[in-house]
Image (cartoon, grey):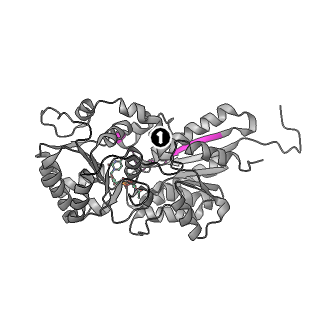
Amino acid sequence: MAPKSGSQERIPMKVLSVVGARPNFMKIAPFVRALERHNARCDGHARMEHLLVHTGQHYDDQMSRAFFADLRIPEADINLGIGSGSHAEQVGRTMIAFEKVVRAERPDWIVVVGDVNATCACSITAKKEHVRLAHIEAGLRSGDLEMPEEINRLVTDRLSDLLFTPDRLSCSNLRAEGTPEAMIQFVGNIMIDTLEEERARATALALGPLLAENRLEVDGAAPPSLGEDQFAVVTLHRPSNVDDPPTLAALVAFLLDEVAQERDLIWPIHPRTRKQLEAFGLWQRLRGCRRVHLLQPLGYHAMLRLTMSARVMLTDSGGLQEECCVLGTPCLTMRWNTERPITLRSEEGTSWLVGNQVAQIRAAYQEAQATSRLARRPELWDGQTAVRIVDALAATAPRR
Ligand code: UD1
């Protein structure tokens, strides 16, 4: 039936969410599912129309498609195909392409997650097009403006109308910057929604086949048999760790000459890191070590399986710090600062902040080995964050 003339008929709210790079995918999966559940419960104007945009910042099957499949994320409605490039190239190309989408779709809300270049580029575009912006994972601050992610966080949060924070420290950061209280919503950590949803599937994976299926450079050797709580896992991809030859060489020497002398070391390799290891002549050294197992970038469940069973994690990833916290895995965070202080042992976590100098890493590594697993669960890291976010969006005024 056509709306009566002059009536204020409400139409469903339109939400456009954005992903671009690997750490975004596990944050959007629970949001999409919570939206679907909301729509199954509601009818008429209370439903929310949803479009998913992938900027294409990450594009390899292992970095992108595998996560959509593993986490049962519906295919993106629109892929901007941005690909790799310098920061300015990525952000600029994303803004140009995303502006066309926003003009064509005119959503009520644009929802961005995390702190990658796609997050920042789409936030700026949203505001320039006068569309309301919501940021999932707002308020994290490392204070380190040399990290591109910190710039992305500052810009995105300054422009957002709704700031969904993972912990109370992040709320305090936003308050200190003058963000109005009504715009800050403490909802918990959405990554943990995914962890809890997928935990059983990860637990069911056997370690042997996982290794055999993902190994690089095997030279016909049989995969090792890994014991629970016996092996170390390392992941590195930050420019500060992998782009400087002496730094990366010293880290590789520590991993080979010390860690891999006493236990198996599993290393899923990020494409940026592989390029640098090859360019700096370090790849051959790693290949030659019997107890170092180089893997291709892993799918979500395989990585979670390794994280839940590792004796120790050595990483510069923000997401892994958080997952180690809930899984109880001792974690060496190979950075000089963290935007996630809640994951440190001094707060509610299981991580040591160790930077990238070997003496400090070695000392914490020895301490971590002597530390038993102890799962920690910060407030509202309860698997229900996405529901709180969708409820908050649904409570906002719709279009007319
Ligand atoms: C990006 C994010 C970082 C996040 C990381 C997770 C920014 C500023 N950085 O860093 O916060 O922790 O993703 O992976 O957004 N490459 C491929 N295939 C791909 C994607 C990348 O080979 O599918 C290679 C390209 O050579 C590219 C390089 O990896 O130049 C780096 O990719 P990029 O997206 O620029 O940054 P990341 O280091 O992945």
Question: Does residue 88 show up?
Answer: no
Q: Position of residue 134 (x, y in %)?
A: 60, 54
Work out whether 320 lies above or below 155.
above
Question: Does residue 178 show up?
Answer: yes
Q: Position of residue 305 (x, y in %)?
A: 33, 37
Work out whether 259 lies above or below 362.
above
In the image, farthest residue toward the right: 5
The N terminus is located in which quarter?
A: top right
Residue 57 belongs to the span the image colors magenta: yes
Q: Say what amino acid the circle numbered 1 marks.
A: Thr
For label 1, the crowd category at 10 Å Cα-Cα, with few meaning under 14, some 14 to 19 and many 20 or more, is many
**As rendered, which of 376 and 177 lies closer to the eye?**
376
**Residue drawn 29% across and 30% down?**
206
> Residue 45 is drawn in which quadrant?
top right
Say whether mark 1 is within 8 Å of ligand 1.
Answer: no
Work out whether 147 lies above or below 10.
below
**As rendered, which of 83 and 67 lies closer to the eye?**
67
The residue where tag 1 is placed is 194
Determine whether, in the image, residue 44 is placed left or right of residue 130.
right
**Residue drawn 53% across and 64% down?**
155
**Residue drawn 37% across and 43% down?**
63
Q: State which region is magenta.
A: 49-62
